[in-house]
Amino acid sequence: RSLEGVVERATMPKNEPNLALLAQLLTLALCAQPLIRSPTDDPTVPPVSTTLMQTFFPLLADAILERQMADSDDEEEVSAPNPQLVTLMQTDPVIRKIALTYILVRLGGGGI
């Protein structure tokens, strides 16, 4: 919803504080289990990926905007997924989690 709000306001996703906070929390959540399993004297949480904030969020915002425009056109034309989005999903677990969550929300809402 945060990213959809960014799309509606026509702002840049990488500058959205709520998205940055959500990205930090998700990064922490995904690395928490290994940190707990292998405790160290100085546990370090990896920083939020710059790829997530500067590349993935803008690409996903473009995909959301494109889908909204296609929904309003009443045409059933389905476009192929952006290859860069697919590559990012394959390489980064945080990006994969966000993208799959978006897909599941769209499926649940009957949007796909």
Image: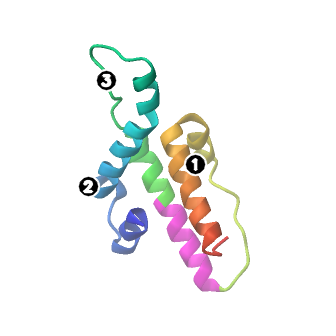
Q: Which residue is mark 2?
A: 17
Which residue does the image show at 30% across and 50% down from the upper left?
A: 21
Q: Which residue is mark 1?
A: 85
Task: Look at the numbered disc 3 and give the secondary structure of its residue.
Answer: loop
Q: Position of residue 48 (x, y in %)?
A: 35, 38
Task: Answer whether residue 49 is visible to the viewer in this image.
Answer: no
Q: Amino acid at mark 2?
A: Pro
Cα–Cα span, label 1 and label 3: 28 Å
CA neighbours of label 3 inside 10 A, class few (<14), some (14 to 19), many (20+) = few
**Above or below, comparing residue 33 to residue 72 in the picture:** above
Q: Which residues are magenta?
A: 61-73
Which residue does the image show at 57% across and 34% down from the upper left?
A: 91
Task: Look at the numbered disc 2 and give the secondary structure of its residue.
Answer: helix
Q: Which residue is mark 3?
A: 44
29 within the magenta span = no
1 vs 3, front mark: 3
